[in-house]
Amino acid sequence: MALRIAVNEENEELDALLASIPELVKPGGRVVTLTFMSLEDRRVKQAFQAMAREGRAKILTRHVVKPSEEEVRDNPPSRSAKLRAVEIL
């Protein structure tokens, strides 16, 4: 998996997308992310927090949203899913 991430420059692409959110989304618009790897989630969390500190966004999910035990039981790959959301100001 690490090779795929490096070859596809996935981390750089994610960083570029996160940096461009304020220009892509109108005020009042919302951005919701669903990550499956801790490295991705950390980047999203830090980007959302930075936007909030700068007064460019309001964090809608103070705590990460994870799948319920029932969801994980019915859909085991969902166990690593994390949802975060912000509203652009």
Image (cartoon, grey):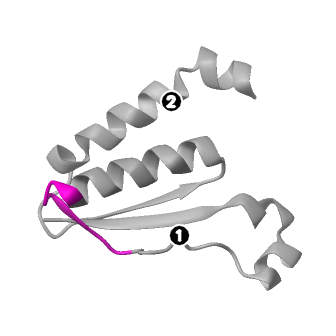
Above or below — where is 89 with respect to 48? below
Up-down relation of residue 55 to residue 17 (above or below): below
Decide which of 17, 55 is in the foreground and name it: 55
> Residue 43 placed where, x, y %?
46, 43
What percent of the width, then of the height, locates residue 38?
Answer: 63, 48
Residue identifier under label 1: 64
How far apart, in angstroms, are the residues tagged by discs 2 and 1? 20 Å
Q: What residue type is labelled 2?
A: Asn
Mark 2 or 1, nearer chain start: 2
Residue 86, given in percent of the width and then of the height, sits at: 31, 66
Say above or below: 13 vs 34: above
Quadrant placement of the C terminus: bottom left
Which residues are the magenta region? 53-60
Instruction: Residue at 44% x, 54% y: name it.
Output: 45
Q: Which residue is drawn at 16% across and 70% down?
A: 28
The question of residue 35 being in magenta is answered with: no
Q: Name the residue under label 2.
A: 11
Indicate the position of residue 66 as horizontal and vertical percent values.
Answer: 64, 72
Q: Residue at x 57, y 20 (%)?
A: 8
Give the left or right position of residue 38, taking residue 75 as reference. Answer: left
Position of 14 with respect to 69 (left or right) is left
| SS label for mark 1 | loop
